[in-house]
Structure formats: C-alpha cells, structure tokens
Amino acid sequence: MTTRPATFSFELFPPRTAAGEAVFVNSLEHLVAAEPEFISVTYGANGSTRGSSLNLLLRLLGETDISPMAHLTCVGSSYAETSRLIREFLDAGIMSFLALRGDPPEGSTESDDFLGDIRSAGELVQLIHRVQAERAQFSQLDVPGFPQAKRLGDRERVTIAVAAFPNGHPRSRSVEQDIDTLLAKEAAGANLAITQLFFYGDQYARFVEQARSAGVTMRILPGIMPGLSSQRLRRILDLTDEPMPTDLLARLEAETTPEGQAAVGIEHAIALSRDVFDLAATADAAPGVHLYTFNRHEAVLEVLRGAGVFDVPASAYGGCR
C-alpha cells in the first residue's frame, strides 16, 4: 500500500460537536488505513477533554493496529492528580506520551504562579517514568519448552515525546536556552522530540545541527501543518507566536477561492516535506514527518502522496487534486 523512504504520523483531537464527529469518523478510517507510525491525540487545557481524549486513544488501541500517543500537560496540576492520570492511561494500555508543560490558564500571564507541583515538561517526563516503574517493576517472559514457567525481564518501556522549537520558544531568551531545555528533557528520560511548526526547511536543518552539536541524541521529528487558508494560517501563528511566513501568506491571499488556497498550502507542505526528507538522507535528522491534520484526511494524505511517501491514488480517499 505504501512505499516508505520515511515514516509519518498524525495528530488528532477529540471532536467537539456531532457534526465534527461525523466528519471525523470518515477521516479516521482513511488516516488509519495509511498505516502511520503513530497517531497522537491532544489533551485539552486543564484536562478539559480528558474523557474524550482517553476514549479516542482506547478506540485506536482496541480497533486498529496503530500506536496511540497521549498528549499530557501539567499546568496547575498536583503530583497526586497527575500521577493518577498517568496510571489511568498506562493501565488502559497507552504506552506513548507527548509530555508538555502547557499554556497559562486563560487570564494568566507568565509572571503569575500557575504551574502547580510540576514545573516543567522535564519533570512530567520523570513522573511518567516513575509511575510506570512503580506499577510494572518487571515483566514476566515465557520460557521456551516449559509452558508453565516464567522468567523475569525488564519492564515495558514507555515512549515519551517532548516539544522542540526550531524558531525558538516564545518565552525563551535565546537559542542556547531552547537547546539546553531540550537536553534537560532528554536527560529526564524523553526519547523523541516533535517540533513546533516551521515553514522552511533550513529552519529545521539549522535546529537539528545545533541540537546535535550540543549533545541531543534523540530523534527530532519535524511537525508540519498544511496551511489551507490565510485565515487558518493567521490563527495558528497567533496561537503559537511563530514568525509569519510572508511569502506563503501572500500566495494564499492571492487566491480567490478556498480550493485555490488549499492547493497553495498543500504544495508548500509537499515541498517542505521533501526538504526534510532530503535532509535526513545527508544529516543526522529524523527520516519522517508528523502532520497536523485538523481531523481531516484529504490534505495530509495529499502531502504524503506528493512527497513520495504514500502511493494510493487521490481518487481512493477523495484527495484535493
């Protein structure tokens, strides 16, 4: 079904309305059929989607062969409640996490004391490992030829991803601080990084080079969002404080139809994906992409098809072209 010189993964969020659920069900079927490496599921601010996020993760775990990854944030949480939540996910069979500090509560600023017991994503990484170590100190393995016998083995390890920021964290003072923070997350036990949005291949290439030079060894997976409209692009940039890709915005705004804008955004994301795949062939970068889907399958599958990772004809999934 696929030719895979590189891996790919998707981000989803729990549908918020009945209409969104209807669209989501169709898109989830196509996204799962593409056989991604994993699908991550967002977790609303202050646990606002806790139940629906867990339900979606369990759906992926029970009904598909795709590895689900649970987003976790720790802003305003106590050790006790965060530990209970981590154990709830682990007991359900979720073994992959994206550990995030999270944004300040609405109406708060960085100068306010809103963090709670867990002050950083690195501390959350440590807590996930600690909870897993307490609940499963070892595994029991079969002994070949002795059906009733067991031997002790290492406990099942969790995958813990963290965020990385090619263009700098909005609250960071310098590139060096961003790299030091990523190093600290890896030292805490993170084993995968997924980048915040970027729009040019050289931004990712520069960040990977700086991280490797500083001693970061974990995989740094590039996060890519097809900008399907100027309105969506502006909205995402407002939320993330990423620098404006002025040439992309100009091309989007030059189009007078939604279809034209979508085509521009997909073309840009295809070119960006090819750039990072080319980089992976020549540098110590991640051979893959993590795609932000907005719960729709058409655009991200078009990006993968255009980048040469996915070989199903667009007609098979209602593609944009």
Image (cartoon, grey):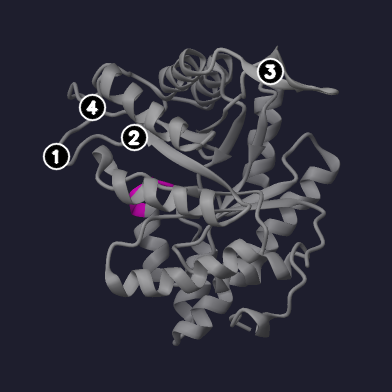
Please name the amino acid that badge 1 sits on. Gly
SS at mark 2 in the image: loop
Vertical placement of residue 35 versus 76, above or below:
below
* Dot in front, 2 or 1: 2
Please name the amino acid that badge 2 sits on. Gly
Give the mark, 4 or 1, whose residue is nearer the N terminus: 4
- What is the quadrant of residue 300 in the picture? bottom right
Residue at horizontal 33 percent and vertical 18 percent from the top: 119
* Residue underneath mark 2: 102
Task: Provide residue 103's location: percent of width, then percent of height.
Answer: 30, 36
Give the mark, 2 or 3, whose residue is nearer the N terminus: 2
User: Mark 3 packing: few (<14 Cα in 10 Å), some, or many (20+)?
Assistant: few
Q: Is residue 220 visible?
A: yes
Residue stretch rendered in magenta on the structure: 238-242
Give the mark, 1 or 3, whose residue is nearer the N terminus: 1
- Residue 215's disc is 3
Name the image quarter holding the C terminus: bottom right
| Tag 4 near tag 2, CB within 8 Å | yes
Give the mark, 4 or 2, whose residue is nearer the N terminus: 4
- Residue 107's disc is 1
SS at mark 3 in the image: loop
User: Mark 2 packing: few (<14 Cα in 10 Å), some, or many (20+)?
Assistant: some
